[in-house]
Amino acid sequence: MSVSYQLYSSRNFTPWSNVIETLATLGYKQVEGFGAVYDDPVRFRQLLDENGLSMPSGHFSIEALEDDFDATVAQARLLGVQKIFAPYLGEEDRACDTAGWTDFASRLSAIGHKLRNAGFGFGWHNHDFEFRPLEDGGIPMRILLEADPALEWEADIAWVIRGGADPFEWIETYGHRITAAHVKDIAPDGLNADEDGWSDLGRGIVDWAGLTASLRSKGVTLFIMEHDNPSDDARFARNSIETFKSF
């Protein structure tokens, strides 16, 4: 089992040198990258190496993967990334029916084919909108997974819940497609408004002990701590890794 940390959680607490040093001190050995850390991949890789961390996975935008593939792959290689996940689709680009999401799955399939040929794994990272029924009743996440059998899934479980779906049911059905999981907790109603309703792992309402067991039973080994808007990233990082190690 691998415990990683999505660096997006610390975007408001830079410089990155301080963030990486803190994570290493707290016992993290791995991080997951996102766009803001790719500007100087050589220096960032040096920073990771100096602190004994690696970056097995990273978020890279659809636009970068489609429009600047070679440069994006070069960044990933410099950073040691092995799995690339497309992280988001803007609201203006989201289809409203099954046909549109099937077309989007074809775009992902084309990207995945190129990345696998280049030696990377490739998958989709969900938010909540992929679980909300379309006008014709289709479920975007199901469409993506069934339209492209090779597509991996980085399951952001808290967003699954916020999308109104049962994560245990999705893990049971599609757990064999999950190659990484975001570990994020949801605060009780009315709490942590300044943190967008998220909480440190174990301080919220999500059954992460049960979910971790369910995910492990499906072969998931890469677990990535994430908080979309912590008021204190070091507190979140510390509480979350300590709690996760107890599962």
Image (tube, grey):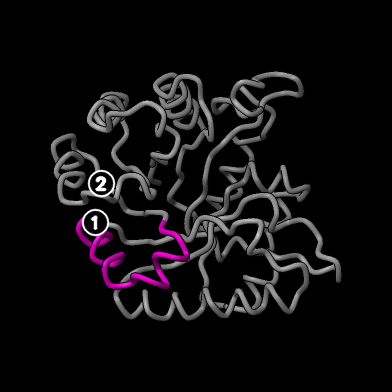
Q: Is residue 68 magenta?
A: yes
Residue 246 vs residue 3: left or right?
right
Amino acid under label 1?
Gly
The percent coordinates of residue 68 (x first, y second) are 34, 70
User: Dividing the picture into quarters, in which one does residue 187 lie?
Assistant: top right
Q: Earlier in the sequence, mark 2 or mark 1?
A: 2
The percent coordinates of residue 194 (x first, y second) are 61, 20
Residue 117 vs residue 170: left or right?
left
Residue drawn at 65 percent across, 60 percent down: 92
| Above-or-below relation of 214 to 75 | above
Residue drawn at 76 percent across, 24 percent down: 189
User: Dividing the picture into quarters, in which one does residue 133 lie?
Assistant: bottom right
Task: Tell me the element at label 2.
Answer: strand
- Check disc 1 and report the residue beneath it: 80
Residue 68 or residue 88, whichever sits in front: 68
Residue 181 vs residue 121: left or right?
right
Amino acid under label 2?
Ser
Distance from label 2 to label 1 (Cα)?
7 Å
Residue drawn at 40 percent across, 46 percent down: 1
Task: Tell me the element at label 1.
Answer: loop
The percent coordinates of residue 145 (x first, y second) are 62, 71
- Check disc 2 and report the residue beneath it: 54
Magenta segment's dominant SS is helix
Q: Which residues are magenta?
A: 60-78
The percent coordinates of residue 198 (x first, y second) are 61, 29
Q: Is residue 247 magenta?
A: no
Residue 222 or residue 135, whichever sits in front: 135
Whether the residues at callouts 2 and 1 have beta carbons within 8 Å, the answer is yes
The local crowd at label 2, few if under 14, some if 14 to 19, many if 20 or more residues have their Cα within 10 Å, is some
Residue drawn at 75 percent across, 49 percent down: 166
